[in-house]
Structure formats: C-alpha cells, structure tokens
Image (tube, grey):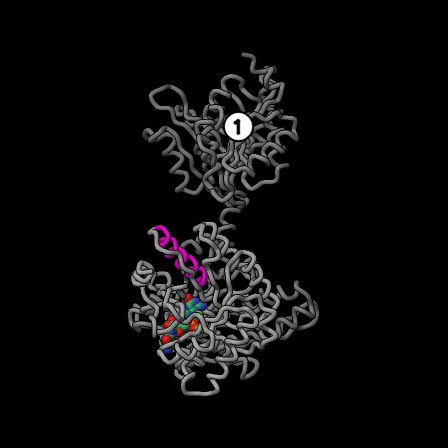
Amino acid sequence: MTPTSDRAAGRALVLEPASQRLRIVVREALERVQLQVAWAGRAQPFERALESRPPALVVVDAEAEGAEAAIRAAAGVGSPVLAIVPGADPGAADRVLEWGACEVVRAPFPWRELANRASLLTRSAGGAERSAPARNDELAVITRLAGFSPWSFEPGEQTIRTTEQALSHFGVTRPGPAPLELLLAWADPEDRKALVAALTGGPLRDGSFALDTRLTLPDRTERIVHWQGEVPHGSDQCPRGIVRDVTEERRNASRLRFLGHHDELTGTLSRMAFLQQMERAISLARRHRRCGALMLVYLDGFAALNEEHGDEVGDLVLRDAAERLAQCLRQTDYVSRASATKETGQADPLISRLGGDEFTLLLTDLSQPEDAARVAHRIIEAMRVPLSVGGGSLLIGANIGIAIYPRDAVESDSLLRCADAALSRARQTGRNQHQFFQTTSDPARARRLTLERKIARGFENGDFQLYYQPQVDIETGEILAFEALLRWNDEAWGAVSPAEFVPVAEAAGMIETIGEWNMREATRQMCLWRDAGLQPVRMSLNISPRHFRGDRLLRALNQVLWDTELDPELLEFEITENAFMENQEAAVAIASELKRIGVSVALDDFGTGYSSLSHLRRFPIDCLKIDRSFVADISLDPESAAITAAILSMARALRLRVIAEGVETEKQRQFLKARGCREFQGFLFSPAVAPDDAAKWLRRA
Ligand code: C2E
Ligand code: CA
Ligand code: CA
C-alpha cells in the first residue's frame, strides 16, 4: 500500500450525499481544484474504499447515512476530512469536529468556498513525508487557518500547553505552558468552574467534553472560546483536545435568533413573535379578569414622504417612529422574555411592524379600556413632533384603531380585524385621530367575525362534511351525477348553511383551501365507490369565483387526478356566471384548460347573473343550471315560465346540457320535461344525503 502516491494523484473520496444537488456542487468544486472524485457509500462500502486507497481528502455530508462512521474511519487512517453541515443546525459543526473532521463547511455554500477549503486541506496535508520541522510549520498553518489549536493539560503542574494564538484568546501573552489559574483569570466564574471540573474532576461519562468559556478581557472585549477535549482515564495520558475562538460564530447565531424574532429595519418584534406574545397576553388577561388593548397605528403621509424623499429617508422615519412608539409605552408593556433580556440586554416593547407604514402595539394589563385612549393620545402627540433630517424637517401624522380584549375578541386574528375596522373609522374622521372598535354598531359584522374563527377551527377539527345530491334523468329517474354540497354542524350554533358560511370563507381568503379539500374529499369518495364496484357517475363540485383564477385550482386538480387515477370526464365544476364576468380572460383560459383535460364546466344559478347570450357563446362551458328561483315559480308566474322555456331553447341551440335546479313538485317536473329539459335535481327526487345513503342509490342503479 503506498498512500503517498495516491495522495499525489489527488483523489478525493466522497461519502455519497443525500441530496442530488449537493452531489453536483461537490463534484464541481473538487474537480476545479484538480481532485479526482470517487464516490462511496451506496454501491461501495465507504470503509473498504478508504482502506484500499487512503485518499488525499475525504468529504462527508454530515446528513448522509453513515456520516459519523465515515468521518471516524477517515480520521483513523489519517486522511483530512472536510465535513458539510447544515447551516441551520448550530450544534452540527461541533459534532463533526468531535468525530474527527478537520474542516467544516456550512450548507448552503458557494462551490468556490468548498473548492478553496479542499485545496487548502490537501495542500497542507499532502506533505506527510516531509521533515518534522516542516510538518510543525504546516501544522501551525493548518491550525491557524482552521482556527483551532491543540492543547494538553498537565495535571501535576496544573498547566495548559497550547499555541500562542490560543493563549492570546485568553489574554495571555507569554508563550509556554500557562498555569490554568492564569489562563482563566478573565473567564466567567461559572464557565471557569465548569472547565476546571471537566479537566480535573471525576471521570466524565464518555471521557470527552465540549464547552464554552466566556471571557471579558481587561480591555473590555468579550470573547467566547470553545473547548473540546478528551480525558483518558485509567491511563497515564494527559487530557488533551482542541480549542478555538467562537466569538463571531456565537454572535451570529444569537443575531440570527434575534432576527427571527424581530423586524430587521426597526428592531421591533416580528409578526410571529408579536402574535405569540399576544396569545399569551390574552390568556393572562382572561385568567386575571383584566383587559388589554391591541392598537393599530397607521403613519399618515408616510407613503407620500417615502415617494418624495426615497427609501433611505423612509427607513429613517420608520426607525424613528418605532422609537417614539416604544417611548410611549410603560415598561410593564415590554416583553419580559428571559431570552430577550439575556440576548439583547433589554426587554422588548410589544410593538411590531405589520406592513410598510403600520405598527401594531399591545397594551397589557389595563384596568379599564379607556386607559388605552390616553396612550393613543400620547402616541399621536409624539408622532406630531417633526423629525429633522439633513437640515429640513419632516412631518407625519398618525391614526390609531383600538381593539380591546377580551371585550371585542379573544383571538389574535379577530382582534387584528377589530383594530383594523377601528382604524378605518379613525381615518374617516381625519388625521391624528383614534377610534375604538364598536361591536354594538354592527351585530352582523360581529357574527361574521365569529363565524370566520369558527370556520377555521371547524375545518381543522374535521367538522365539515360533504353531502351528495343526485342529478337525475327527468324521464327515467336514473342517477346521472351527484352534486357535492358542504355541510357543517357547529357545536354551539348547530347546522350552519353554506349559503351563510361560504361567502364568509370567501371574504376571509379561506375558500381556496376549502375548495381543494372538497375536491380531495369528493374524489376520495368516488374512489371508495369505484373500489366497491359501484357504477361510476359524474361528480359536480362547486368552485368559488375566487378560486377560479390563477393556477392554484388547476394544480390541485392535476394532483388529485394523478393521485386517484379517476377519469377526468367524471368531474364537473360548477361556477356562477360572475366567475366568468369578473375576469373574463382568465376564466375563459381556465375553462379551456379544463376542457382540454376533460373536466366539464357548468354555469350555476343561471339567469341570476349578468351574462348575456353573446357571453355564453364565448365561454367554453358544457352545461347550464337553471336557477331554482325560476323553477320555483314556473307554475305560478308566467314570466318565470317564459324565461325557463327561453333558456331551454337557447341551450339547445348552443348544444349545452341543461339541469333544472330546485325541482320540488311533480308539476314542475312535467313542465320542464315538456319544454325539453332532460335532467333535474331537487327535493322531488332527493335532497343532498350522506355518503352512505348516496351509495344506496348507486347500488340500486
Ligand atoms: P347551489 O350550488 O346552487 O346549491 C344548490 C342548493 O340548493 C343547495 O343548498 C341545495 O341543498 C339546495 N336545493 C337542492 N334542491 C332543492 C330543492 O328542491 N329546493 C330547495 N329549496 N333547495 C334545494 P345548500 O347546500 O344550502 O347550498 C347553498 C349554496 O352554498 C350552494 O348553492 C352553493 O352556492 C354554496 N355551496 C354549497 N356547497 C359548496 C361548496 O362545497 N363549495 C362552494 N364554493 N360553495 C358551496
Ligand atoms: Ca351548485
Ligand atoms: Ca345553483
């Protein structure tokens, strides 16, 4: 075995990474620095590849299967190991170093970085056969570049032997073995205790340790040094390991944590952190029978100012506004999160920037709602003071909407909506005004707000169900299709009609989610029937106009068709005329695509919207559903009868299928049949029924 010749050939052995992308980047990087890449791990066991030809470099993705064993094995044969660790996992670097890696790259990384490190590692490790002094020299280079130094501890003398560079981390300038006492002179007392215990205390569980020492040097610089060591027990070897300065690393990590909770521009809480605090504050208030206020502060005139003076000035104004808001709050309204205090040295005011020029702010523990008005007043006054920028002065105003919890709402999103409504009213009154949310003024709105919450929750709890109403042949009564209709039983309110909750879900932006659930649920049901050997019939799904645009609907449909392998011809989408009228081009495009896929489209509630005959010809639809208001009146009202007859003859001319909706009586059925209608749906045959009852119809068929 002649390892040196292999090293000269520049072979890099790579443990096959989990991701294909990583594979590409690694190959690219290594080949750029003239390393010949060999893969191992899947087709070939890594250890065997290693033993047969110890490579110049080993690269291991810490997330790949067998990463630990591979690193340990490579370190065992003396090949330098470069480990790739996920950047999001702060402990990963320490772990792989402990396994024996000598260099770490955090993913994601540019391939150039990997190339540089690989090149450095192979160059410094390549001279294994050189003279001892040269090797020492190179060791010094490696440790300096890699940022760590070896150390050993002499228990008798209580001294640490390490590099000058490492000594300097501790503020020690004299070279040579340093008394532990001296080395730790500036260390945090707790950290000092921990290190001394690790070095001199009883045997450690697995003989190894890793810990941080925080230092405050005489010139007041703060530093964090990371120790990793082994304490061999039962032998006469000294404890030893590596040590490195991790000040920047730890600072970055804590800054990242800070940014996760904060808005980078203003330093106020991130939306998520704010909502979390709000949930907490609301439940505390409920428990202690106190109240609190959620304020929405709108910077009036900010948009224009930003436009006129540019983003830089805009940012300045936002930062200044955040500062002023913070000053208007009492300290008790600050978050007393232990972590926040520790990391930033101060508590956070409960302020968050919602969008460009809107801030939300929480007043906790108010004895009465009116107290919020005083704070609002203070804020408005504070915002009025002009801000001087570059010799000039800028003026903005503020409007504030206030929602009180638990009086107005007890859920953060409803509270935000209350505050929003209050803010709209405040802005209607003029600049520099505040308004409270008023429930009593709008009970319908209050029910809507509650409904919104209930829908979201009911949906999560699986309280929604699909019922199926048969669409039948007007002559034979044969079942041709089912229309899927949503049913919802709320615990407190009982059955809530889709006619009430669908519009609310639409307004609240939930209808797409609901529509997609419907599609999955209805097709799941169809699959169950198919698998039970029942006769396949068409399924008609109601699609909201909001959903009938963009590509979300088609993507969901394709997914469902892919998953279920159902024949697309078994699906029909019901949409109202308005879906077409609101955005004709987009709607026509979607309908055409549906036609291409094989899914048919029916125009629901036909006759109640505003489409005309000329529109009908342009819309690529397959079916018209005559609205039940006409059907209800056909036998009483000549006008309805005339309209229905007209729709039927027009549809025939356009070669469209027609379904009459809401047929309740035999008389209506006869009338429709006589005018050439072929299909109907209505209580005369059956209302929408539960899936099991629908299956009975199919079995009978
Ligand atoms: P729609 O699409 O026009 O649905 C037909 C409605 O008429 C259903 O009310 C159905 O139960 C009712 N109906 C059927 N036959 C008769 C009858 O003979 N007489 C009378 N009086 N009514 C009859 P439902 O289920 O309450 O649905 C109301 C509306 O809610 C639907 O009108 C539709 O616009 C909407 N909707 C229901 N389910 C969904 C859904 O899954 N997604 C969407 N986007 N909307 C839905
Ligand atoms: Ca319908
Ligand atoms: Ca309808």
Q: Which residues are magenta?
A: 513-531
Is residue 170 rendered to the left or right of residue 691?
A: right
Around disc 1, counting alpha carbons within 10 Å, would you say few (fewer than 14), some (14 to 19), or many (20 or more)? many
Q: Residue at x 55, y 60 (%)?
A: 595
Residue 572: % across, % down: 47, 62
Vertical order, 52 against 149 (above or below): above
Figure check: 650 above or below 522 = below
Judge whether residue 451 can be spotted in this image. no
Residue 674 visible? The answer is yes
Specify the quadrant of the image occupied by residue 14.
top right
Vertical arrangement, residue 77 with respect to residue 219, above or below: above
Image x and y of residue 135, in percent = 59, 19
For numbered disc 1, what is the local secondary structure? strand
**Number of dots carrying numbers:** 1
What residue is pinned by disc 1? 81
Quarter the N terminus occupies = top right
Q: Nearer the viewer, residue 337 or 24?
A: 24
Q: Quadrant of residue 199?
A: top left
Identify whether 147 is placed above or below 599.
above
Q: Is residue 524 highlighted in magenta?
A: yes
- Using the image as rendered, state which of residue 202 and residue 588 is in the foreground: 588
Which residue is at 49% across, 24% downward? 44
- Please provide percent x and percent y for residue 426: 51, 80
How far across and down, in percent of the image, does residue 55 sit? Answer: 56, 21
Residue 608 lies within the magenta run: no
Screen quadrant of the C terminus: bottom left
Tell me which amino acid carries mark 1: Val
Q: Quadrant of ligand 2?
A: bottom left
Most distant residue in the top direction: 1
Would you say the magenta stretch is mainly helix, strand or loop? helix
